[in-house]
Amino acid sequence: MNELLLVVTIGGQRVAFPADAVESVVELDTLIPVPRAAPHVAGLSALRSRVLTVIDCMRSLELGATDCSDGIREAAVVELDGHHYALIVDLVEDVVEALSAPAPIRAAMGAGWERSSAGMVETETGPLLIVEVAALIAGVEAKAA
Amino acid sequence: MDDLIADFVAECREMLEALGGEVVAWEAEPADRARLDSIFRFVHTVKGNCGFFEFPRLEALSHAAEDALADVRAGRRQADGPLVSAVLAILDRIGEMVAAIEAGSEMPPGDDQALIAALEPGIEGTAAPVAATVAEAQGKIAAPRTIRLSVELLDRVMSGVSDMVLARNELARRLRESPTDVPIDGAFERLSSIIAEMRDAITRTRMQRIENLFVALPRMVRDLSAELGKQVLVDIEGGDVELDREMIEMIRDPLTHIIRNAVDHGIETPAERLKAGKREIGILCVSARQSGNQILIDIQDDGRGIDGKKLVEKALASGTLAKADAAELRPRDQLALIFEAGLSTAREVTAISGRGVGMDVVRSNVERIGGIVEVDSKPGAGTRMTLRVPLTLTIIPALTVSIGNQHFAIPRSAIDEIVRANGESVKLERVGGAGVATIRGRRVPQVVLADILGLDSPMKDEERTLIVLRPAGGDVYALAVDRIHDHEELVVKPAAPAVMATGLYAGTTLADDGSPILLFDPAGLAQVGGVKLEVQERTARIAEGPAVAVPAKATEVILFRGLDGARRALRLSVVDRIEEVPAGAIKPGAGQLRVQLGESILPLTGLGGGELPNGKVRLFRLNDGSHEVGYAFQEVIDLATIDHDLIQADCPGEISGVTLIGGEPAELVDAHWLFASHVGPAARPAAEQPVCRLPSDDPWMQNMLRPIVEAAGYRVVGDGDDAKADLVIVSDGAKVARGAAGRTIRLRTDPEAAGARDSSIYRYDRAALLIALKSAGGSR
């Protein structure tokens, strides 16, 4: 069976997360800011009795900031190195099957996309960019390091 | 098959760890049959298993060791240094191989024949030095039944229980919000207590005996002392103290480092020791004990000690210390300099403990887990290092505070005190843009939490609350917060790297209402806030010197009920703090009742005619600036001020008079009388004490005579000290510089006087000695 992808919209673009990296999709209501943290760390939230570190994907991808003031946001929950993160996205669409292996994109993309994409795959709904979860979590500083 | 090998590897590891200490103990006492047997059992087990698993090299090694040990057991051979060394070498090789098997890698290369040959009797190895262990005398109790569990499983259970606690907290909050029936409350109470019990139990499963850490020490010290040509006896105590497994791992390196230092720099070579009048064999005591929710680990050696003055010189030379500050350092602060980066008093850099990188790393490692390292040393007499670490990392008592409407938590262990910024004894000033708070005459740097965090806070400086934090155990700073809330026990979890990168936080936790709270790292806050901790504490003390004259005001007293039921009052200024001790800590000693409080023993009073209550005794810790006295009481009634006239007592005594406090009479306790009658001659301030010079190189004088002289109220100085001595004591025949002292006492070793004109005193004539001491002191 081919790899499953979770299709989400970030900054108006349809992209995909590898589905097996995503634990669940949640709606965040409370968001506790983390003062002095990197800008892409939107804050903390709680899922059941777990603390989630909330990542603003817009900022990670250098596309601007998500407006978190209007309450409920959709987010994909992932685990990395024992910590749980919630990645804020505009919209979670669907789970689709990848029809090809990721292929490099040779066209020029935005710097943020360039850093965090793992290539493009074909799906039934057309080509989708695969976004690496770890790159989103690392944020802008990863490039500098 | 794989499972069997894994079990074999785990078993070997455990046995090897336990054996490290046994072998060394066996070396010290080759006749010790029990130790020999346990080593024999180990090699026998390995041999048996190897044959089964087909590890021929392991089998050959263990077989050879088994043969040699069997000879010793049968009495055909004596255990000697070379044999022990050879057996140790084989155990090491077995350990390497077992590790290789576990990792699934190639067997370590090397020829085992040489090791096996070394077992032959009559082979001259390097003469093994004596390093013995005096293990805690504990009878071999039948081992409790155990099973082996993977640590991950335990961690999973632990985090499950933590979640359960949080879920319970949330349920509690929901229950509070809605009116409920009594039966539901009852059921919830039961659930709560079961969860609490379970949390305790699971916390204990994560506990390990600190023995696991200690077993490796004798072996390490043996190898080290062999390399350095020293003789060291290790004395280990308190191996049964339990500590969080994670914590044990965290203190392994600091402890190892301190012990290496002690053997390398502390303990002298046998020749030097003899010259200093000590036993050839140095003693290294490692002991652990629990005190409240902390574990104290003492590492004490009787070596050459740390020279505070030399440290100061070094610090001056390297520029870590300013000259002006150096003069202000108290001996304790001088010693604390060893924790500064780049300082070491060792003349030569050795392979063992390296160069000055070390103690600063030890301190930062210990502080990272919320612990403290303390050092105490007497030149010539030895050094004591004390590690204080919290019992566990996961559940932390904390204080919640808020800025605007966001809550944060501060670990309670770091909090020194909490004062209101607009309080009477607090003054806020700004010096060059930096905040300085003066709290009861003490200057401490002040930072505003809202500024550090870059949060908006509408509150004025004066309305805030100051939390005085002591992150490193020594240095303090004041943190201004908008509001403080509650003390809570929080289940803290590590935060994501992106959050930790700020350096401000130690972890995250969930509040009762299920919202996340960030837990601060007090040292990180200081750093981000720009507070320089090391430097600050020194100047803080200097500011204490010319104390601000306190305007006359009503005397504040603490009103309490004594053990005999009487209403009494004590001036608040002499009460250091209130302590609670088990009745067992109170014992008569040296002529009066004394109470043990942690490290110190204080005279205890306040008992009156009243009986000591069973169980816990509460007492005031009174402090006159240099001495402490305990005063037992029943309960504190209130804080009050004396606004009525005091009716003086007729004769001086414990009670200086009676006054009306809160409309009822209360006896005012005379703190001066308490100190005068309970501290005795030792209470004389150092400046007024007569000075006695004793030869510092005479062990008899230092060990036997010195306590008597000090008990008579003298301050004892050595030859090197320039202080003017009121009295010099020398052994008969020694020369004394004329005019060097007010009086000289000569001691002779012969009970009979040499002649009528001999004015010397026989050194065990205690009565004559005391009279001479008294008259010399009185002539001042």
Image: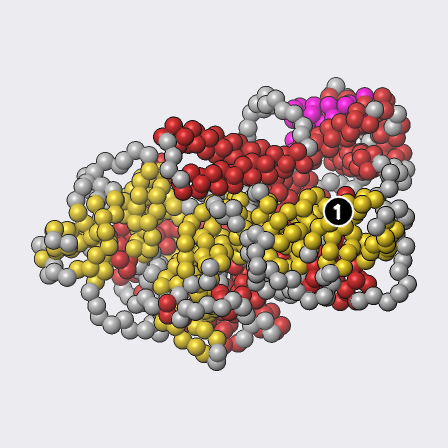
Q: Residue at x 59, y 64 (%)?
A: A36
Q: Residue at x 49, y 65 (%)?
A: B449
Q: What amino acid is at disc 1? A: Asp
- How many marks on residues? 1
* Side of B728 where B353 appears, left or right: right
Q: Quadrant of residue B650?
A: bottom left
Q: Nearer the viewer, residue B514 or B643?
A: B514
What residue occupies the far front of the structure in this picture? A125
Question: Residue B25 lies in magenta, yes or no?
Answer: yes
**Residue A71: x, y in percent?**
57, 56
What residue occupies the far top of the structure in this picture? B74
Colouring scheme, one of rainbow, by chain, secondary structure, one colour = secondary structure
Q: Nearer the viewer, residue B304 or B53?
A: B53
Q: Residue at x 78, y 29 (%)?
A: B6
* Side of B596 where A7 appears, left or right: right
**Residue B614: x, y in percent?**
30, 33
- Give the dominant element type of the magenta stretch: helix, strand or loop: helix
Instruction: Name the residue carrying label 1.
Output: A94
Q: Residue at x 11, y 53 (%)?
A: B663
* Side of A19 where B405 appears, left or right: left
Question: Residue B487 lies in magenta, yes or no?
Answer: no
* Subunit ID for the residue under disc 1: A
Q: Quadrant of residue B56?
A: top right
Regarding residue B341, the answer to whether it shows in the image is yes
| In the depicted structure, whether residue B219 falls above or below residue B505 | above
**Residue B386: x, y in percent?**
53, 50
Regarding residue B726, the answer to whether it shows in the image is no
Q: Write down the region rendered in magenta.
A: B24-48
Q: Quadrant of residue B34?
A: top right
Q: Nearer the viewer, residue B319 or A78?
A: A78
Determine whether the residue tagged by mark 1 lies in a helix, strand or loop.
strand
Location of the N terminus of chain B (image quadrant): top right
